[in-house]
Image (spheres, grey):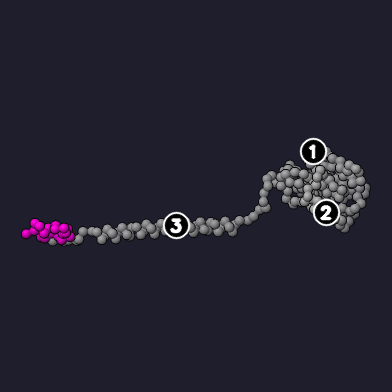
Amino acid sequence: MEIPEWAQHYFSKGLLLNPGPLDPTSSWAALRIQKIPEYPQKDQDLLLSVQGIPGNFQDFNWYLGEETNGGTMLFTYFPDLQRPQRDGSAMGQHDIVGFPNGSMMLHRVQPTDSGTYQVAVNINPAWIMRAKTEVQVAEEHKELPIIHLPVSAGIMAAIIIGSLSAGSLFICCIAHLLLTGGWRGQSHSPCPSSSRSQRTTPTRCGAGKGGWGKGGS
């Protein structure tokens, strides 16, 4: 199966095989696994790059699960054989390819591929190096979380200030209409007259256009 171009970059740079200090008394000390990408999404290819393997090892086994036994074995890899990869009972529908340096690639990973992946490298019958990593495949493609609190706070403040401004403007308009209407009502009201003047003489407020001048005597 063809290796993606981005994975070939890591092969060419020698990142998949990075020998480190070896300590026979601690089989977990030098071996480590790098996930590429670190947070795989559904249908992406995931490379589990094993780093710290010495150049002279016999074979290695990959497992899926907390236990390392025949029931959890994905495959065994014998680098000196023409067909080096031998699938185990846990391979199932997984699309996995092993590499001579101990690494492996999962093609088009699914959420069901999530779990604990372990590798055991047999240096010799008395020395086995081990490493494990947790893989979590996201159901959908998601961007890394981004905090929007400052922007949301600014938008909320703008909404509140805008609402207050609109309310103040509305109140000012109502007050202006009330004051204007009251002033106009006062300016057109009839002239005040006392009860005595109403009994003796007619008022001049209605005079105009020849009102009482015609029949007055």
Q: Secondary structure at mark 1?
A: loop
How busy is the neighbourhood of tag 1: few (under 14 within 10 Å), some, or many (20 plus)?
Answer: few
Q: Tell me which residue sits at (91%, 43%) in the image.
A: 81
Residue 216: image quadrant is bottom left
The mark nearer the N terminus, 2 or 3, is 2
The answer to whether residue 11 is seen in the rendering is: yes
The answer to whether residue 33 is seen in the rendering is: no
Determine contact: label 2, label 3, CB under 8 Å: no
Label 1 amino acid? Gly
| Near-viewer residue (6 or 183) | 6
Q: Residue 92 location, x and y as percent? A: 79, 38
Residue range highlighted in magenta = 199-217
Q: Residue 34 location, x and y as percent? A: 79, 52
Label 2 amino acid? Ser
Q: Residue 119 location, x and y as percent? A: 83, 48
Q: Which residue is mark 2?
A: 12
Label 3 amino acid? Ala
Q: Which residue is mark 1?
A: 92
| Near-viewer residue (204 or 27) | 204
Point out the residue furthest to the left here: 217
How busy is the neighbourhood of tag 3: few (under 14 within 10 Å), some, or many (20 plus)?
Answer: few
Q: Which residue is mark 3?
A: 166
Q: Secondary structure at mark 3?
A: helix
Determine contact: label 1, label 3, CB under 8 Å: no
Mark-to-mark CA distance, 2 and 3: 65 Å
The mark nearer the N terminus, 2 or 1, is 2
Q: Nearer the viewer, mark 2 or mark 1?
A: 2
Q: Tell me which residue sits at (8%, 56%) in the image.
A: 215
How busy is the neighbourhood of tag 2: few (under 14 within 10 Å), some, or many (20 plus)?
Answer: few
Q: Quadrant of the N terminus?
A: top right
